[in-house]
Amino acid sequence: MKILISHISDDTRLFDFTAKRTHFDIPELHQDVQLHAEVYRSGSNFYVSATVKTVLELECDRCLDPYRMPVEETFRVIFARNIEDEKEDDVAVLEPGAVELDLRPFVRDILMLIIPFKKLCSENCRGLCVLCGANLNRETCSCDRNRIDPRWDKLNELKKTLENAEE
């Protein structure tokens, strides 16, 4: 995912890359990563607009089933030789004498940021039964969910004693 600076002109050039999923050290990647980039030069700066496509394989936090999440995310970055431009969020500073633009770190960052904090196979996921562990998306269980855990008995007795004392 490197582009030689000598291949970039003032006109927009298109570049397509496919990288093996193993090159990113992200266990959730299920497919290889595709990158479509549009690059042009303006003065000493290089402007990149790119789209990343792949598929992530995640485990649902509620039901523990694996599911796949297609990813298509766009990002922009400016490679600048002038250090004054570094204050912008989407600016990367090119070292003097650099001969290529490396997009792999930006692609990796996008992939890491797109992984959801709360992974859900669907918004309506019912999860697992807390008593028997059955996946409630696939089956119904006959557990009594109104049953109170016996470990709370002493606390309930204390609560009743305090309520009686107030009367």
Image (cartoon, helix red, strand yellow):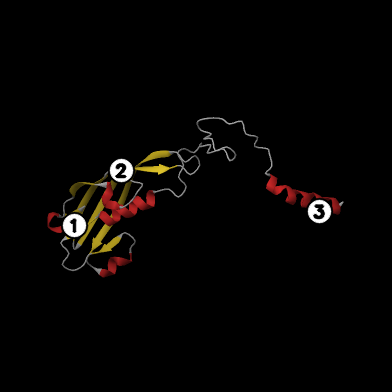
Q: Determine whether the residue tagged by mark 3 lies in a helix, strand or loop.
A: helix
Please tell me which residue is depicted at 22% across the width and 49% down the height of the picture. Answer: 38
Answer with left or right where residue 30 lies relative to residue 96. right
Q: Residues within 10 Å of mark 2 (few under 14, many from 20)?
A: some
Please tell me which residue is depicted at 40% across the width and 38% down the height of the picture. Answer: 67
Number of residue marks: 3
Q: Nearer the viewer, residue 52 or 131?
A: 131
Nearer mark to the viewer, of 3 and 1: 3
Q: Which mark is residue 115?
A: none
Nearer mark to the viewer, of 1 and 2: 2
Please tell me which residue is depicted at 43% across the width and 43% down the height of the picture. Answer: 59
Measured Cα–Cα span from mark 1 to mark 2 = 28 Å
**Extreme-left residue of the structure:** 6
Nearer mark to the viewer, of 2 and 3: 3
Q: Give coordinates of residue 148: x percent, y percent.
A: 69, 42
**Dot 3 corresponds to which residue?**
162
**Dot 1 corresponds to which residue?**
41
Q: Residues within 10 Å of mark 1 (few under 14, many from 20)?
A: some
Please tell me which residue is depicted at 68% across the width and 48% down the height of the picture. Answer: 151
Q: Give coordinates of residue 82: x percent, y percent.
A: 23, 68
Answer with left or right where residue 20 lies relative to residue 97. right
Q: Determine whether the residue tagged by mark 1 lies in a helix, strand or loop.
A: strand
Amino acid on which the number 3 mark rests in the picture: Leu
**Dot 2 corresponds to which residue?**
54
Q: Nearer the viewer, residue 55 or 74?
A: 55
Amino acid on which the number 2 mark rests in the picture: Thr
Q: Give coordinates of residue 14: x percent, y percent.
A: 19, 47
